Amino acid sequence: MKKIIFLALILRLLGIFLFRNVDNYDLQSYLQVGELTLKGINIYPKVANLHHPYFPFFLYLEAISYWFGQSKINAIIIIKIINIIFDLGNLYLVYLLSKKNLKASFLYAVNPVSILIFCLHGQFDAIPLFFLLYSLYLIKVKKGAFSILVFSLAVMIKTWPLLFIISLYKRLKNKKLILLIPVFPLLSIIIYILLFKASFLDIGKTLISYQGLWGIWGIWALLGDWRLRWQKLSTIIFLIVFFLYSLIKNKKNIIKEAFNLLIFFFVFTTNFSIQYLSWIMPFLAIVKPKYFWLLTIGITLYLGFSYAAWIFP
């Protein structure tokens, strides 16, 4: 396993080196938010609406990276190295969740999707993904309270892990533990309000109003110009259907259940952002369906075309 972790580290560091001059909107947002946070400026709601539609946690890492970096390139490299650290954690959790299966670990270690999204694009979904996987591991080993607190950390960083809340809830012996999920998100808000004199309402509005690019993925892309009229309604309908599906989709193995939920999500979601594709990779490596390589190659080609303008400006 040590050799696989070392290989994964080399591949990800190579990715950072090869794509060190890549620039994009998200990387610029990290720098902007980091600089404003260092200056003690409240970014909610004006800046956050466009550049940080999340709970106030990752902005501290952006600020630290900006302070240590001393330059634009170095600050971005620090953020990407943070991504690598957590993605190596994801690799080890794949190892544990697959019952120490080296093939599954190797598949995740060398998959190009995670490397492109975390080391080229610079998206930080590796962090909430780590805490999500860790919470799933803890629920499997019957540590319900600890699992929910770790899940709370995942939600604090990005809200998309809430897609799996029903899967966790069904496996809790003490159902009341689910009430612990808001602990860390609320704590992050309270600390930010005290430090930056921000408004709870402004932070809440920013989080609720955010969604990915609408209408370019799934069947809703077929609506053309009409899609804008159904934007909010379709999102609500999708979430209702998704959570109903979560209730009826019962598998003994929580990883296989989560994998099926993600397939359902990608087929029917009305909102999409390219970094979402990183979510499925650890589950894909563990479940190892027959179409693993076909799907991995397809996603990689999609990412390649999407990132081409950044790589060859």
Image (cartoon, rainbow, N blue to C red):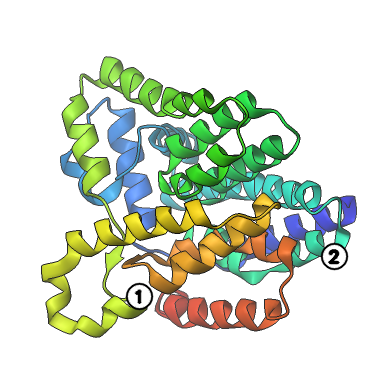
Residue 185 lies in quadrant = top left
Instruction: Check the image and report above or below for 301 versus 186.
Output: below
Instruction: Check the image and report above or below for 40 versus 89.
Output: above
Instruction: Tell me where residue 182 appears, x and y as whole percent.
Output: 41, 27
Q: Pointer 1: residues within 10 angstroms few (<14), some, or many (20+)? A: some
Q: Which is more toward the observer, 46 or 175?
A: 175
Instruction: Check the image and report above or below for 303 versus 197.
Output: below
Q: Is residue 20 left or right of residue 109?
A: left
Label 2 sits on what residue type? Lys
- Mark 2 lies on residue: 103
Pick out the residue farthest to the top: 194
Residue at the spot 49% in from the left edge and 80% down from the top edge:
302
Residue at the spot 79% in from the left edge and 54% down from the top edge:
98
Q: Is residue 22 visible?
A: no
Q: Which is more toward the observer, 196 or 113?
A: 113
Q: Can residue 131 be seen in this view?
A: yes
- Mark 1 lies on residue: 217
Label 1 sits on what residue type? Trp
